[in-house]
Image: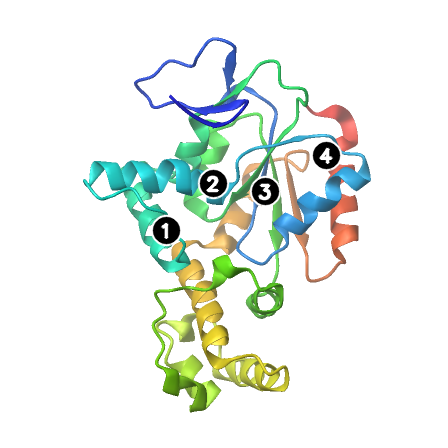
């Protein structure tokens, strides 16, 4: 039994849920679905301002650190060490998904919370691709899903603006001479980038980055995150699956590029508060 917080614990299949705890699969749960940069963290910060009281579960990053990476390192006899490089983390989560269908959803389904928790509504940030949401519908039959989406160019722009050190990928090894290269050429050299961005989009990205004086290596690092994530998680099919599988009372889709963060938060809070579904 591993405790992730004062009131949240993780149990393996071989371990019983401890006294005083209840399986998350049996509790009211709201699952945010969306890729990096769609605005999940911003919406979560704004929800309390809209009168929504909830318990925020350990997020995707925390569960990846404390459960997925740690368990795989121990199983492989590797030293237990933090992994901050996003691309390397994608590799770990892919390994976990190969071992446990559902990946992150499987890890989430093993959480238990203390029955005396003050807020009965739980929110998890968040799931991503089709595989994860398919298993979530099965693991969490009472859950509701909030799907946040935005075009890849918008997500990239948000990554470049937010300056999160976690987004700086160590594995994108860049030579110092790269800063003197043509930025468009540097972007075209990113593996599999043609599957996500057109050459015209890359030219526009390069122009905007030059005008904003963003270093070449930072642009390449963060666009690599977008490309790698797209290859690991198909958010479009995940959205379509939820839309066709669930009634409107259990699934909400919002394009965060079309609305301000405050408007998105207001819409999500109103939807979660209507009808007291739980």
Q: Where on the picture, by quarter, is residue 84?
A: bottom left
Asked whether the beta carbons under mark 3 and mark 2 sit within 8 Å of each other, the answer is no
Residue 62, numbered label? 2
Q: Can you give x and y, in whole percent of width and height, for residue 83 in the image? A: 37, 51
Residue 272, numbered label? 4
Quadrant showing the N terminus:
top left
Say which residue appears at 49% left-offset and 73% top-offset: 218
Query: Tag 3: Cα neighbours inside 10 Å, few (<14), some, or many (≥20)?
Result: many
Residue 83, numbered label? 1
Q: Mark 3 highlights which residue?
A: 32
Say which residue appears at 52% left-offset and 40% top-offset: 59
Q: Of callouts 3 and 4, which one flags the residue occurring earlier in the amino acid sequence?
A: 3
Q: Of callouts 3 and 1, which one flags the residue occurring earlier in the amino acid sequence?
A: 3
Q: Of callouts 1 and 2, which one flags the residue occurring earlier in the amino acid sequence?
A: 2
Q: Is residue 191 left or right of residue 133?
A: left
Residue 57, numbered label? none
Q: Of callouts 1 and 4, which one flags the residue occurring earlier in the amino acid sequence?
A: 1
Indicate which label's residue lies in the foreground, 3 or 1: 1
């Amino acid at each position: 039994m591993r405790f992730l917080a004062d009131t949240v614990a993780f149990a393996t299949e071989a371990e019983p849920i401890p006294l005083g705890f209840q399986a998350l699969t049996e509790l009211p749960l709201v699952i945010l679905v969306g890729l990096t940069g769609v605005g999940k963290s911003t919406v979560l910060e704004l929800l309390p301002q809209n009168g929504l009281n909830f318990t925020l579960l350990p997020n995707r990053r925390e569960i990846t650190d404390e459960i997925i990476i740690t368990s795989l390192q121990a199983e492989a006899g590797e030293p237990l060490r933090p992994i901050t490089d996003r691309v390397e983390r994608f590799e770990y989560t892919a390994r976990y998904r190969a071992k446990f269908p559902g990946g992150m959803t499987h890890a989430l389904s093993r959480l238990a919370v203390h029955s005396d928790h003050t807020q009965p509504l739980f929110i998890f940030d968040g799931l991503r691709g089709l595989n994860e949401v398919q298993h979530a519908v099965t693991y969490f039959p009472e859950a509701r899903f909030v799907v946040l989406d935005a075009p890849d160019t918008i997500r990239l722009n948000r990554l470049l603006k937010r300056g999160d050190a976690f987004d700086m990928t160590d594995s994108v090894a860049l030579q110092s001479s790269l800063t003197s290269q043509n930025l468009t050429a540097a972007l075209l050299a990113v593996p599999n980038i043609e599957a996500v961005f057109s050459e015209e989009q890359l030219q526009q990205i390069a122009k905007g980055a030059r005008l904003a004086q963003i270093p070449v290596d930072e642009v390449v690092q963060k666009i690599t995150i977008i490309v790698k994530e797209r290859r690991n998680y198909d958010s479009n099919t995940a959205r379509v699956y939820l839309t066709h599988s669930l009634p409107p009372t259990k699934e909400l889709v919002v394009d965060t590029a079309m609305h301000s963060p405050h408007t998105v938060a207001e819409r999500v809070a109103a939807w979660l508060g209507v009808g007291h579904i739980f």
